[in-house]
Image (spheres, coloured by chain):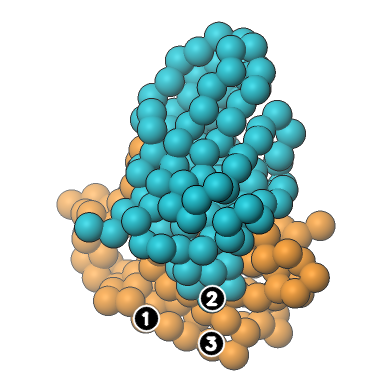
Chain colours: A cyan, B orange
């Protein structure tokens, strides 16, 4: 089944404790991206990647890191999480960044205390 | 600054009725416009995607229109069903020079009552 998976689905952590949210897709898509969704705000793009070893900042990259060492994986890294990073995070992938629909993962709900 | 405004913010309709959701944008240069459906607590699912040259696209009971001159789009839902209750999100991506970064609207929350 074609899908985007994220782990963990739920995470509660403390300020400053490094964490990684994994994202994997099995559709051989070139384009992957990370978003956060907060109440009353639209989804906002954190980082995106057009291909292996190619990543770039989205609208709200501060406090996040990403890597794209393999085509299928695009982990999101929070080196020193803070409470303002409490949010619902989505990973998405698509064949390219232009004309194709994006496939979203199920989301990761992160709480930083 | 690129912006996407959706209206209404929320909408309640009876099952079987039609409804239309609106999206106005100021994204430039324009690349494409997408409508997504997002059920509570789940990832968005694509309904339609339109490029500059397309002014209408249908997907089952969903029909999206695009007026690139006025920078407006609408999503029409025909014969609504209970399962249509969700948030509908309009997303506009900037084209060359805009790094294709998408701008998301805040969504319209649709509730369909029996």
Q: Are callouts 1 and 3 both on one chain? A: yes
Gap in angstroms between the C-alphas marked 3 and 2: 15 Å
> What secondary structure is found at the residue carrying circle 3?
loop
Gap in angstroms between the C-alphas marked 1 and 2: 16 Å
Quadrant where the N terminus of chain A sits is bottom left
Rendered location of residue A52, percent (x, y):
58, 56
Rendered location of residue A29, percent (x, y):
45, 63
> Which chain is mark 2 on?
A
The reply to whether residue B95 is visible in this rendering is yes
Q: Are callouts 1 and 2 both on one chain? A: no
Q: Is residue A38 above or below residue B9?
A: above
Q: Residues within 10 Å of mark 2 (few under 14, many from 20)?
A: some
Q: How many marks?
A: 3
The residue that appears at 62% across and 84% down in the rendered structure is B52
Residue in the foreground of this view, choosing between B102 and A17: A17
Q: Farthest left residue? A: B114
Residue for badge 1: B58
> What secondary structure is found at the residue carrying circle 2?
loop
Disc 1 versus disc 2: nearer the observer: 2
Residue for badge 3: B55
Q: How crowded is mark 1: few (under 14 residues within 10 Å), some or many (20 or more)?
A: some
> Which chain is mark 1 on?
B
Numbered circle sitting on residue A99: 2
The residue that appears at 55% across and 9% down in the rendered structure is A14
Q: Are callouts 3 and 2 both on one chain? A: no
Q: Farthest bottom residue? A: B53
The residue that appears at 54% across and 76% down in the rendered structure is A99
Q: In this view, does B70 lie above or below B6?
A: below
The residue that appears at 57% across and 81% down in the rendered structure is B51
> Which chain is mark 3 on?
B
Q: In this view, does A72 lie above or below B61?
A: above
Rendered location of residue B74, percent (x, y):
51, 72
């Amino acid at each position: 089944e074609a899908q985007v998976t994220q782990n963990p689905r739920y995470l509660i952590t403390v300020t400053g404790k490094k964490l990684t949210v994994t994202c994997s897709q099995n559709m051989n898509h070139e384009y992957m991206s990370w978003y956060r969704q907060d109440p009353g705000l639209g989804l906002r793009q954190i980082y995106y990647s057009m291909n292996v070893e190619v990543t770039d900042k989205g609208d709200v990259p501060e406090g996040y890191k990403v890597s794209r060492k393999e085509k299928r994986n695009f982990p999101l890294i929070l080196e020193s999480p803070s409470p303002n990073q409490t949010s619902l995070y989505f990973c998405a992938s698509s064949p390219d960044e232009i004309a194709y629909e994006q496939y979203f993962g199920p989301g990761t709900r992160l709480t930083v205390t | 600054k690129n912006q996407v405004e959706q209206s209404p913010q929320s909408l309640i309709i009876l099952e079987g009725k039609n409804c239309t959701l609106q999206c106005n944008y100021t994204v430039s240069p324009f690349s494409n416009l997408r409508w997504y459906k997002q059920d509570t607590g789940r990832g968005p699912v694509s309904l339609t995607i339109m490029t500059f040259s397309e002014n209408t696209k249908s997907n089952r009971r969903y029909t999206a229109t695009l007026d690139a001159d006025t920078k407006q789009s609408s999503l029409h839902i025909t014969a609504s069903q209970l399962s249509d209750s969700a948030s509908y999100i309009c997303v506009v991506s900037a084209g060359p020079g805009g790094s294709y970064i998408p701008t998301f609207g805040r969504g319209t929350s649709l509730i369909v009552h029996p």
